Image: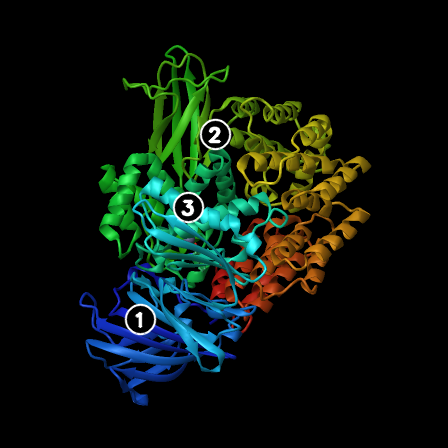
Amino acid sequence: MNAPQTIYLKDYAPPTWLVDTVDLDIAINDGFALVSARLAMRRNPDAAAGALLLDGEDLHLESIRIDGRPLGADEYAYSGDKLTITSVPDDFVLETVVRIEPDKNTQLSGLYRSKDGYFTQCEAQGFRRITFYPDRPDVMARFTCTLHADKSRFPVLLSNGNPVAQGDEDGGRHWAKWQDPFAKPAYLFACVAAKLEVVEDTYVTTSGRRVRCAVYVEPGKLDQCAHALAALKLSMKWDEDVFGLEMDLEHYMIVAVGDFNMGAMENKGLNIFNTKFVLARPDTATDTDYQNIDRVVAHEYFHNWTGNRVTCRDWFQLSLKEGLTVFRDQNFGMDVHSAGVTRIQEVRTLRAAQYPEDAGPMAHPIRPASYAEINNFYTATVYEKGAEVIRMIHTLIGKDAFRKGMDLYFARHDGQAVTCEDFVAAMQDASGLNLDQFQRWYNQAGTPKLIVRSSYDAAGKRYTLDVEQQYPATPYEERMTAEGNGIARGPYYMPLVLGLLDAKGNELPLRLAGEERVQGTQCTLSIRKDKQRFVFADVDAEPVPSLLRGFSAPVVLDYPYSNDELTHLMAFDSDAVNRWEAAQRLATGILLKGIAAPSVPADTWIPESYVEAMRRLLASAFTADGDPALVAEALVLPAETYLAEQMEVVEPDAIHLARLALRQHLAQALREPLLKAYHDLKVDRPYSPDSEQAGKRALRNVCLSYLAELGDEASHALVLAHYEQAANMTDTMAALAALANLDVPARHSVLDAFYARWKGEALVVDKWLQVQSTSRLPNTGSDVRALMAHEAFDIRNPNKVYALVRAFCAANPKHFHAADGSGYKLAADVILQLDPLNPQVASRIARTFDRWKKFDPARQAKAREQLERIKAQVGLSSDVAEVVGKALD
Ligand code: PHE
Ligand code: ZN
C-alpha cells in the first residue's frame, strides 16, 4: 500500500444497496470467532444501478447464501477488501458466515481482544473487519446482535439497545441477544464479551423515561467509577436544559477498556471508553484527569443526538458531528467548571495542536475534499477548529437563534445521514442571517491572519480600526489546484468581538460613527471583506483595544500592542481570555527577544515592568474576586512549541534556554510572594475535584514549579516535601514532574518507589512514563529507549506509546529535535516497529514530524533521512504512507 489512493468528496454517490435490518450472531471461541450475518437488503431507488459490492477486511468467508440459496463459486468474488456479487434480485436476504481472529487483531479496529475480554471499535471502517457489509455511514439499518461465549470467562455480553433474551448453552457457554430500536450506520455498532464489574444508577428524563446508566470496568476497579457515572447523569441533565434533548434508550452503558486507539467511542447506547477517561480516584487521578473525564463522558453522550440520531452522509462530513459535539462538550465544561479557565484551555489547545497542523503538510479544511486514509482525519482541525466554526455561528446569530437552529436541524434531519451544508442551512433558516460566505470555513484550509491597526483623531474624538484579513493558500490548496480540483479562495465571514479600555481601565460605551445605537461596552464586528474600516465616535482619549474577546474567531491576531498596553489589559480587561492572552503576548515578545540574543544575560532582555506585572498578577489571586485557576493559567509561560511556531527558523535550544532563563528569573525575583502563595494556598479539606479546590491546587503547583527552578537546597527540599506530603495524585504529579527535571540523587529513588507503589495501576504507570519522557535532563533520549525495554512498557498498548513516545516527540522539543538526530531516529524506529501492528497509532507518531521543514538545514537533513527510511518500508500502511508522503512533498 505504498501509494495510498486518494478519495474525493466530489465523487460521492448514494449507496446502490440499502440495508433494512441486520441480524448478527457472534460466537466467541478460543482463538477465533464465527460471525453469522443476515442482511435484509434492497436496491436504493435513488441510486444508479450496479453490482452488489460489500466491504470486508481480514475475513475468512465460510458460507454465503442469497434468499437461502448457497452461491456457487462463480457467483461472487472476494478480493482487495471487496466482496462482489454480480447478480442479485432487487430485494433479498444475504446470509454470510465468516471466521475472524480477534486475538490477532493488534490494530484495535473491528473485534479485538484486550486482556481477558473482547471489545469492538467500528468507527470509521472497523465493521468491515467483523462481517461483509456496505460499510459507509449513509447506510442505516436496525441491528440485532446475539453473542455466545464461555460463561465463566465472559460473564458479561453486551451490545447496542435493549437486552431481549439470554440463556445457557452446552459446554459451559451462554448467549445474550440485544436489539437496537434505532436505525444506525455500522460505525455505531458495538459488542463486548468480558469479565466486568458494573456500577449502576438511574436517570429519569424530563418526560419520565427511566434510563439505566451503567459503567462497566475490569474487576477491582469499581472504586474508580463514581466520577464518570456522575458526569454521565450531569450530561443528561445539561442536554435537556440547554438543548431540550433527552436520552432515547432505556440502557446507557459505558465500558472501559485498557487498549483503545482513541479517547472514547459513542456507539449507540454502548459507549466504549479508554480507561483513561473513566477511572479516577483521588490517589490515582489528577484534577485534570477528572475534568477530562467530565468532558469525554459528556462528549460521547452528546453524540447521541449530534452524530447518532443525525449522522454523517460520508466521512468528509466528520466535522458535522465532531465539531458540533466538541462545541457542546466545551459549553458543558464552561457551565460545570469555570467558563474563563475552560475557554483559555481550549484556546491553548487549539493554538498548540491545530495551528501547526494548519500551517504544515497535513493542512486541511474542517471538511476536507480529499483524503487517502480516513483514520488520519480525526484531527485537531476537524475537532477543535470545527468547534470554533460552530462557536462563530453561535456568536454571529446569538444563543436563542442558535437553539432554534438546532431544533430545526433535528426537525429536518432526525434519522438521516446529512452534510455540513444541511447544518449551516438550518442555522441560516432559523436565524435569517445569510451564511453563504460563512461556508468558506468548511472549504478553505489554513489559519487566517487578522491584521488590525488603530488610529485616534483627538479633535473629532474618533477611534478608527482598520481590519485586514489574509489567508494564503496551504499545501492542501496547492495540491487540489495541481489536481484540477482547486477552489476560488476568498475572505472569511467572522465575528470580531471587542471592547475599548480607557487609561483607568474602565470600559468605554461603544457607538459606531453613523449609528445611533450605543452597543454597551462590548460589540461584535462583522468581518466579511479583505479590508474593512470601523470608526467609533465619542471617544474622549485614545483607548487600549481589547480585540478578539473570548477568542471570537480562530485567527492569528496581529496588532502592535506595546508592553504597557498589554500590562494594562492584564490588569483591567473584563474578558478573562484577553487578560490571559495579554500575559501570553507579553511573555512571547520578551522571549522572542531573548531567543534572538542567546548569549546576552537574561536581565538585559527581561524588563522590570514585566516582573512587576507578574507580581501583581500573582497578588490578584488573593483579592476578593481573585480566581486562582485563572492566575495559574496566566503565570504559565507560552510553551516551547508555541514559541517555535512564532519563528521563521526554529531554534529549539535557544527557545528552551530563553524560556528556562525567564522562569528562573521570575523565580528569583518573586521568590517571597511565590513561597507565601505556596503556603497560603494549601487545601486542608478532604480531596474533591471541584473547581475551587482544583484552582487552588493549580496555582499552588505552578508556584512550586517556579520555586523548583531556584536550584538550591531549599527548593529541592520543598519539592521533596511536597511529594511526601501529597494527599492526592494532583500534588504527587506536580512534585514528580518538578523532580524529573532535577539532577539530584532523590530523583531515582523517588521514581523507583513510585513505580513500585503503582505498577499495578496502568494509568498511573503511564504518568510515570510521561514525566520521564518529557524531562529536560540531558539523558532523556536514552532514558526513553531504556524505558521501551522496561516491563512497564508495551508497544501494543496505545496509552503506553502515547505516554512514552508521543509525549517525547510532541512535548519535549529540546530532545526530539536534538541536533544529532537521535530524537528523529527514535521516533522512526518506533513508527517502523508499530506500523505492522497498529497503523493508526504509528501514524499519530509520524505526525510529530509535521513541522520538520521549519528547522535549520542540518536538522532538516536528519529528519528527511528518517522520513525517507520510513517511506521506503515495504508494506507500509496507508495511514503512515499518507502522513510521510505529504511531509516529504
Ligand atoms: N468518534 C469518537 C469521538 O470523537 C472518536 C473515535 C474515532 C474513536 C475513531 C475511535 C475511532 O468521540
Ligand atoms: Zn466525537
Please say if 344 is above or below 176: above
Residue at 50% x, 15% y is 503
Residue 667: x and y in percent read: 71, 32
Report if residue 560 is visible in the image: yes
- The kind of residue on which mark 3 rests is Ser
Specify the farthest residue to the front.
168
In the image, residue 71 sits, relative to residue 816, either above or below, namely: below
570 sits left or right of 271 in the view = right
Query: Where does the image place residue 491, in percent across and percent down from the top left?
Result: 34, 40
Secondary structure state at the residue bearing disc 1: strand
**Mark 3 sits on what residue?**
235
Distance (Cα) linking label 3 and label 1: 31 Å
User: Crowding near pointer 3: few (<14 within 10 Å), some, many (20+)?
Assistant: many
Q: How many marks?
A: 3
Distance from Cα at disc 1 to Cα at disc 2 = 58 Å
Q: Amino acid at mark 2?
A: Tyr
Say which residue label 2 marks: 559
Q: Mark 3 vs mark 2: which is more N-terminal? A: 3
